[in-house]
Amino acid sequence: MKHELRFGMITELYSTVTGSRKASALDLLDHWFPGLIVEEDRSGIRKDAVYDDLQYRIKAVRVNGRLYTGNDSRTIQIIGRLNGTAKGNQETEQKTAELIRKHLAYLIAEDDHTAADLFDHVHEQLAALDDSVQQKLCTQLQEYALYAAEERTAMDEYTRVHEPFPMDEEVFSRIVYNVIYQTGLQTFRGLCCAWLWMLCGSLLRNEAGRVTRIYDSAWVPVFRETAETPDLADKIDYLQHPEQYEYVYLGDDLDARFPGVEWYCDHCTAHLNDQPGFDDHRNVWVCSRCGCENRISSEEIYDSRQDWYSGRHTNDPAKFRKAIRRRRKEKRT
Ligand SMILES: [Zn+2]
């Protein structure tokens, strides 16, 4: 079995795990992205679903509770592209599907309400599942992402680039990483985040890059981009086996108590290191912007803002001190 980021494949995974009724691609698009791709035609007259170019939406009639797809071949092709199942080379329909993705990615990235509404919707849907099903979904999502990463690594360069509608390395990596990160938290919120990343990644494909550049895995706007993007396999390995990694400090700020650590206000996120008089030897620093008291201690150090937000603590104070000692030694010799 192949583990690809395609809408049809991951909604299939969902229905298998949750035992939900099989639904058409049109119904699933409407179910997971309500109001964003499908617009219900309430005329009451049964007719083929048609794509409206100006609104980037498919207009469809509901018959007996299900959206009616009908026989309009262009619309069927477009749905197939979005679902990631259609084959053949209908270039125009592929372009149309790209336009829909672009439009949707734009809404999710630029309009706060769209992203928040989507998250609430996913939250509501998953909250309705039994605990054991949630747990199973979490495990299966993580496995799926790990397999997807593995299969991609095993693929040779030629296949990766020449497969039909390939996904960019950067976008693929971020989606897969976000899913593994969030499912690894083993929390309900983490599951919601992971499932939403799967949905967005598989539907938006490369256009999801617009979204991953703006939100971190916890769907919190990205604070600061890290300069280097390590290899996906290394990132996953670090996520799953943090104890096997050592800290390295290469800077010269050896007078500081926590060399190389940037401090941010818990309340207003101001950069504390830049505030006049900041000294990390103090145990508490009062933010000069908002007045919030911030504790300055090794327990408050996280690898990233996303770790802080998710309460994911992998920082080992002993390793940190060791890295600083090592650096001091290097400087002396
Ligand atoms: Zn503050």
Image: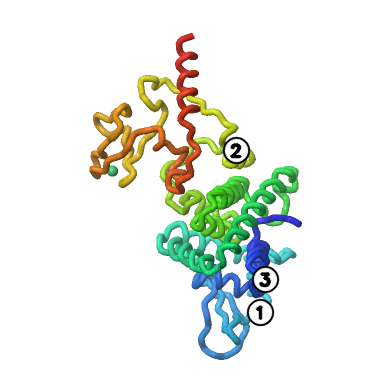
Please give the name of the residue rendered at 69% of the width and 50% of the height, measured from the top-left corner: 147
Quadrant in which the N terminus appears: bottom right
The three-letter amino acid code for the residue at tag 3 is Gln
Q: Which residue is mark 3?
A: 77
Q: Viewed as shown, does residue 152 lie left or right of 269?
A: right
Image vertical order of residue 6 relative to residue 212, above or below: below
Q: Nearer the viewer, residue 98 or 19?
A: 19
Q: Nearer the viewer, mark 2 or mark 1?
A: 2
Please state the horizontal and vertical placement of residue 167, each as a whole percent of the image. Answer: 64, 52
Ligand 1 near label 1 (Cβ, under 8 Å)?
no
Please state the horizontal and vertical placement of residue 97, each as a whole percent of the image. Answer: 60, 65
**Mark 2 Cα within 10 Å, few/some/many (few <14, many 20+)?**
few
Q: Which residue is mark 1?
A: 72
Q: Which residue is mark 2?
A: 241
| Residue 94 visible in image | no
Please give the name of the residue rendered at 27% of the width and 41% of the height, measured from the top-left corner: 293
Please give the name of the residue rendered at 32% of the width and 32% of the height, measured from the top-left corner: 273
Mark sitting on residue 64: none
Q: Nearer the viewer, residue 274 or 183?
A: 183
Please state the horizontal and vertical placement of residue 207, each as a whole percent of the image. Answer: 56, 56
Please state the horizontal and vertical placement of residue 4, each as a whole percent of the image. Answer: 68, 56
The three-letter amino acid code for the residue at tag 1 is Asp
Q: Viewed as shown, does residue 280 lie left or right of 135?
A: left
Is tag 3's residue or tag 1's residue first in the polypeptide sequence?
1
Image vertical order of residue 66 relative to residue 231, above or below: below
Residues under labels 3 and 1: Cα distance?
9 Å
